[in-house]
Amino acid sequence: MTKDTMIAVIGGSGIYDIDGLDGAEWVSVETPWGTPSDQILTGTLDGVKMAFLPRHGRGHVHSPTEVPYRANIDALKRLGVTDVFSVSACGSFRENMAPGDFVIVDQFIDRTFAREKSFFGTGCVAHVSVAHPTCERLSDAAEAAARDAGITVHRGGTYLCMEGPQFSSVAESKMYRESWGCDVIGMTNMPEAKLAREAELCYASIAMVTDYDSWHPDHGAVDITEILATLQGNSSNGRELVRRLPGILGAERAPCPHGCDRALEYAIMTAPE
Ligand code: ADE
């Protein structure tokens, strides 16, 4: 059985809308978890329904800690979204993942501690698996779109999600890279990916490298000026990538071959009343 595809893009630093939407309209959505980061831009691209949510809000008003992650994911679900692409800036722990490159992340280490991380709790307890927190089908689409757009893209990588808002110390940066085997670092993909799984939404993460964090002997400490300079190039590449997604995924969607859209089937512990 197929249903309509609806692609959501959650745009990070540097990406605050998407180009070329037919019938573009910013819509307000309220949720039991509060108000999302901003209104959501809806429309169609190549005949496929699209939604765009600026993660930090237009004007970049929510810090990574303050992003209303539950409201964001729930609002997308309420709009009928099936597939979520997260686009975000990141630092790199690998020489070959250079500023300007994109990484299709497939694993996370969650070091955040000041965020609501679940839709479940008192009254209804559920434990979904996030062993494989991203969807292979969407990651394939993101990789294909990036290659077609001529972007240098790395398939697979472990993303360390830190609380922020400060960047890492040199000691932390070296530990994440050398002992923990992380490839990139950012502040926003968690709990977003966990919540998308609880909401039974397919989720892929496109991390755009802006800097070498603080471990690299030939690069100094990270600073926002460097990040913003790289983001300008990254965001036009990000837009090119997004423009290709509807053509790759198509307007009709079969059940996810990896089961992302059935994640709750064996996850709920609480007995029905
Ligand atoms: N976002 C972009 N660069 C980053 C870094 N080095 N650490 C955390 N978040 C980032």
Image (cartoon, grey):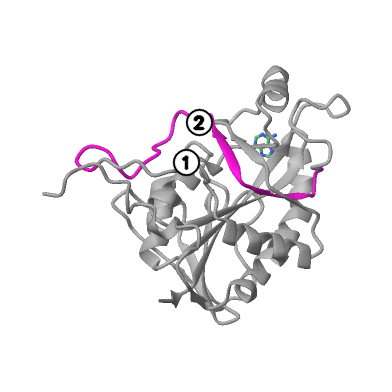
The residue positioned 44% from the left and 46% from the top of the image is: 69
Q: Quadrant of residue 160?
A: top right
Ligand 1 quadrant assignment: top right
Residue 77, position as x, y percentages in the image: 39, 61
Mark found first going from the N terminus, 2 or 1: 2
In the image, residue 5 sits, relative to residue 34, either above or below, namely below
Disc 2 residue crowd, few under 14, some 14–19, many 20+, Cα 10 Å: many
Q: In the image, 244: left or right of 47?
A: right
Is 216 rendered above or below residue 30? above
Q: Nearer the viewer, residue 224 or 146?
A: 146
Which amino acid, mark 1? Pro
Verify whether residue 109 appears in magenta: yes
Looking at the picture, tell me which residue is in the foreground, 157 or 192: 157
Q: Secondary structure at mark 1?
A: helix
Any part of residue 67 in sight: no
Task: Please name the predominant secondary structure of the magenta segment in the image.
Answer: loop
Q: Secondary structure at mark 2?
A: loop
Query: Residue 10: x, y in percent?
Result: 55, 56
Side of 196 where 61 appears, left or right: right
Q: Residue furthest right?
A: 218
Residues drawn in magenta: 98-124
Q: Is residue 138 visible?
A: yes
Residue 112 is tagged as 2
Find residue 81 and report its image quarter.
Answer: bottom left
Counting from the top left corner in percent of width and height, residue 201 is at 44, 58
Q: Do callouts 2 and 1 mark residues in contact (Cβ within 8 Å)? A: yes
Residue under numbered circle 1: 191
Give the amino acid at mark 2.
Thr
